[in-house]
Amino acid sequence: MSTRRKPTDPAASAEPARPRKGPRSSTRVKGHSSIADAAPIDAPHGSRPDQVYARLRELIVGGLLAPGNRIVETEIASRLGVSRTPVREALQRLLQEGYVIDTLGAQQSRLTVAPLTRDDVRELLTVVGALEGIAAQHAASQRPDVRATLAKDLRDANAEFHRAGRASPIDHEALHDADERFHRRIVESGAGPRLLALYHAVKPQAERYIRMYISMLGDIRTSVAEHEIIIAAIAEGRRDDAELAVETNWRHAADRLSRVIELAGERGAW
């Protein structure tokens, strides 16, 4: 087993671009504008709660249902072309997973999209980093030829990430896709079924923070360098270093995004 040591942090002070105040959410997904534009759900009756859940989660993660927005059951049912029953079931699931919160009013409960907070981003990204770190440790334990193939895939993803970040203007959509591919490849290579189940339960909840963070990146050199440290540790079979490097990458992202949220406010309406 390798000796666990702290990976080099080449530019820990690097900051994302300062958010601009305004009504638009920086986590918006291309191709949508609001819940009013959501297409009706065409699915067998029994699968509709799952379909409604997936659609609402997509809208929340994409910032189209913004932090603090009220969730009106009847409006959602009308826009998606379903009855209130699958909407109610989907909202209960979103409530349990933390996408939606219940703020009690004078007469009845009031569902709203969960705010973006410093505590939440730290908790979620720390958990994601810990789970992915375990996967990285396992990946670094594999045969040299398997590690070499994984390292090549990770270098390709990081090169794509670098290209997107050097574009003028920065291609944040391509940046997100390359970053997602980089981290997903680590998890797929090193995680067993139980770890995957835990990861997939938590990662979607962190997605709107990740999208916000990526959309605000102005200088990607720190992230590129941190990715290179991860790749080297896995390629060389340094299990503990690989785990620590992944955890550090996610912790730094949480730190940077926490500072952004502190500047812009915890509602996240920028």
Image (spheres, grey):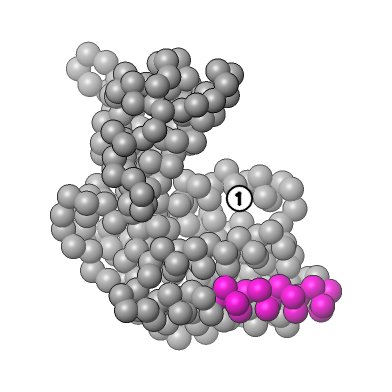
Q: Is residue 151 magenta?
A: yes
- What's the residue at 37%, 79% (across, down)? 167
Residue 95 x %, y %: 43, 30
Q: Report the residue marked by disc 1.
A: 199
Drawn side of residue 163 relative to residue 114, left or right: right
Side of 131 where 191 appears, left or right: right
Q: Is residue 70 above or below residue 197?
A: above
Q: What's under tag 1, amino acid-wise?
A: Tyr
For the image shown, how many numbered marks are present on the structure? 1
Magenta segment includes 265:
no
Image-quadrant location for residue 107:
top left
Please state the horizontal and vertical placement of residue 13, each as a whole percent of the image: 35, 79
* Occupied quadrant, residue 243: bottom right
Kindly indicate the quadrant of the structure image that contains residue 197: top right
- Magenta region, mostly helix, strand or loop? helix
Q: x and y percent of residue 102 in the render? A: 33, 27
Given residues 6 and 30, the one toward you in this image is 30
Can I make out residue 230 in this image?
A: no
Q: Position of residue 119 (x, y in %)?
A: 37, 51
> Measuring 51% from the left and 30% from the top, which residue is drawn there?
51
Q: Residue furthest left?
A: 22
Examine the rendered structure and indicate whether residue 254 appears above or below residue 224. Answer: above
Q: Is residue 108 visible?
A: yes
Could you tell me which quadrant the C terminus lies in?
A: bottom left
Q: Residues within 10 Å of mark 1 (few under 14, many from 20)?
A: many
Q: Residue visible at 45% across and 36% down?
A: 55
The one nearer the camera, 88 or 120, is 88
Read off the magenta span: 143-158
